[in-house]
Amino acid sequence: MHLSRVRVDLNGLSRNELFAVMGGEPYGTHQLLWRLFPDYTGLRPFLFRQEIEDGADGEGRCKGLPLFYLLSEQTPVAIPGFLDVESKPFAPRLDAGETLAFRLRANPTVARRVDGQKHSVRSDVLMHAKAAFAPDQRASQECKDAMDAAARQWLAGQGEKNGFVLEEQPEVSGYRQHSLGRKRQGKPIQFSGVDYTGTLEVIDAQAFMASLAQGLGRSKAFGFGMMMIRRA
């Protein structure tokens, strides 16, 4: 695997690409990043996370510009339109019992049965928790706490399947709902995202490394699921 940091040259983008990147539009951004893998013919070759340049690395970067982190099977190829692509191998040696700090932007969902339908329906974990409150209670602190608890419970469940446990309750922030229109007739694609920060303990190093490569949760094509780690 390769971990890359990608900075975009806004002067090299088309009008639509510029709007997609600066507006954080996930589908257009994903299509743009695909151009870094011109020879790839398989399914999604990378996970990505979009951030904003803070200029704190001492390299004279402009604050407020888009900054991307990619985790990919292949090394991305720099092309006109991107200011800088920095890549390094990603193969950390992890052992059971290690403590790691992490950041994760995820799309937490829950499957629920609906009467009369053959297959379960997936819904937003936080909205599912919010729906349990009466309409006039959904702006209350109690409702917010319930939504945060549901988000944390989802991540704890991911850990059970992917070789890690949370050492403490992670911070939950940045909840946002997204809706992408379709060119053809049909309902828009709707999904949500939430940011997690905290610490975890590796229980099964092999399963945990596999989860890093595959990503956690759904909507990975839209910039979700990439867990960034460092030794605490």
Image: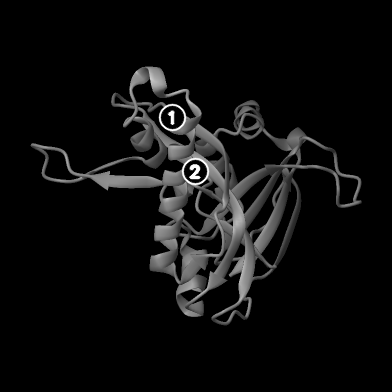
**Quick one: label 2 or label 1, which is nearer the N terminus?**
1
Q: Residue at x 60, y 28 (%)?
A: 16
Q: Dot 2 lies on which element?
A: helix
Residue located beneath label 2 in the image: 222
Cα–Cα gap, marks 2 and 1: 10 Å
**Where does residue 29 sit, x and y in percent of width and height?**
57, 40
Q: Residue at x 57, y 53 (%)?
A: 170
Residue 193 horizontal side relative to residue 55, left or right: left
Can you see residue 42? no
Q: How many marks?
A: 2
* Label at residue 211: none
Q: Amino acid at mark 2?
A: Phe
Residue 78 horizontal side relative to residue 208, left or right: right
Could you tell me if the residues under marks 2 and 1 are in contact, i.e. CB atoms within 8 Å? yes
Residue located beneath label 1 in the image: 180
Q: Residue at x 48, y 38 (%)?
A: 145
Nearest to the observer: residue 228 or residue 83: 228
**Where does residue 225 sit, x and y in percent of width and height?**
50, 53
